[in-house]
Image (tube, helix red, strand yellow):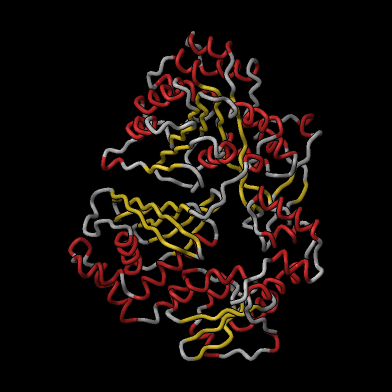
Amino acid sequence: MAERKLLGQILIEEGIITEKQLKEALESQKKTGHFLGRILVDLGYVEEKELKRVLAIQSGIETIDLKNTVIDKKSIKVFPSVLAKTYNAMPVKFERDLLTLAVGDTLSLDIQDDISFILGYKTNMVLADEEDIREAIETYYGKEIETLDNFIKWLAQDVEEIEELEAIASQGEYATITSLEQIASLPPVVKLFDLILLQTVRDNASDVHLEPFNEDFRVRYRVDGVLYDLVHPPKGLSFALFCRFKIMAGMDIAERRLPQDGRIELSMMGRAVDLRINAVPTVFGECLAIRVLDRAKTIFELENLGLTHENLKIVTDIIKKPNGIILATGPTGCGKTTTLYAILRKLNTPDVKVITTEDPVEYMLEGSIQVPIKERIGLTFDRCLRSILRQDPDIILVGEIRDFATAQMAIQSSLTGHLVLSTLHTNDAPSTIMRLIDMKIEPFLLASTIEGVIAQRLLRVLCPRCKEEYRPSKNELLEVRLSEEEAAKMKFYRPKGCPFCRGGYKGRIAMFEILVPTEPFWQAVSEGRSLGEIRKIAIEKCGMRTLLQDGLDKINEGITSIEEVAKEIHGY
């Protein structure tokens, strides 16, 4: 079997790029973790169409001219419009249980197995021009925007199975375990379950929520920190969907009165995905929250998190310390673990031993020892930390400091020559110290061990394709505490919205507040001064730049909008 050529090698052989351009793109790939082809297009070295042609050569898949291809009408019937419009895939031919689909790029090949599983047919992918695919979808399916609710209507063609779901759902608590397992395995339920997960992974959603109400049931997912409606299944299908999730997660499907936790490990779009399921009883039935952990996520470089040049220098200096504690703080889902792993990536060299203990382990860091917490069997953070110290590590990551015992162990570890990284749930950097004092930790111990506190929030990034410059109103300026004189020296951008983004935003970046405590700061803490006074000293004596100041810098640079910064610093 011939060895598959590398993309860069083919591009050079075709005379499309030079070795110097390839080297530049590869350096950028090391820093960002993005696809090489996308980097070359963004740098302007390769045109999008040319890249797709070369990717087709590399993949060895057929390329077709969709405009001059006869579409098999049977293929339209077996491929629902919601799949066609969601994944921009056009059915071309259907014969002997093999469905041929035209897709716009080779990255779409990753969904081949998932679509095959949803439909129950084998699929074959061919490449075609994206614009031709869009035109064909509009011609054969219409221009209306499709949702997963339309997919449910398509599923409802199996009338007998839908009626069976409704009948068992109406039995409520009296439904037997056998009947619950049966409905969870019915084709419409399995198809909807897989499509929800496929959509979740495809859109890089962080969590999914299955929520029952009196007259409605909704499934929502969170993308870039914002919740969006995904689907509103009918009663029978929603009840069966719950059963499917609970069975897959190893939970007790007969127990619907007590909270439960479970876990599902699966592969979607060629990526290993870990789902953490939590069920709580409500007045209208159980509510499921599903946290999505993508094992294939790239660990960011420290330089790509959103740190300003000054903040990057501060962080680089404090992580060089041989011992002490560095804390990342903020609310749930603000990127604390991502920041700590970016630090670990910088520190993880062959001459140091790194051990992490987390609940759950979110990233895979090559060359480090990673220990998952299991509280059900008594493996807690403080107990795990005691054992970790016997492993003679140089750097320890503790997933979260939740109580006095864990805080005490972290302090003891840092006092005995270890660098400890951990997280804490607080609103800002100075209040982190007050939270530790609330845990009954002595101020003199904190002064001896805390090297730095990194508070952060996540901001949605304006789409570079459609953002527009404007002058904000007086009320908007008040939201971020800016005077008209200060605003006159700045630039402001707002979201517009285009086919390539979600409401004018694409991706997220962090804003930071970094505290490196000094002697005057610790003196104020030991004197028991108010949080307001301590915060003022942190700004004046420690040189701390606040979250708001960092957010204003990102507004001026056109990275984000006033709306995003105001939302994160409101009441702060």
- In the rendered image, the vertical position of residue 525 relative to residue 135, given as above or below: above
Which quadrant: the N terminus? bottom right
Left-right relation of 287 to 443: left
Residue at 35% over, 30% down: 386
Residue 251 x/y as whole percent: 27, 56
- In the rendered image, the vertical position of residue 1 relative to residue 283, given as above or below: below
Residue at 57% over, 80% down: 101
Residue 10 x/y as whole percent: 73, 69
- In the rendered image, the vertical position of residue 231 relative to residue 459, given as above or below: below
- In front here: 386 or 454? 386
Left-right relation of 239 to 197: left
Kindly indicate the quadrant of the structure image that contains residue 39: bottom right
Residue 87 x/y as whole percent: 57, 70
Which quadrant: the C terminus? top right
- In front here: 91 or 391? 391
Left-right relation of 489 to 179: right
Residue at 50% over, 40% down: 337
- Across the whole image, how many numbered discs are drawn on residues? 0
Left-right relation of 125 to 448: right
Kindly indicate the quadrant of the structure image that contains residue 492: top right
Residue 364 x/y as whole percent: 49, 48
Residue at 60% over, 28% down: 320
- In front here: 354 or 566? 354
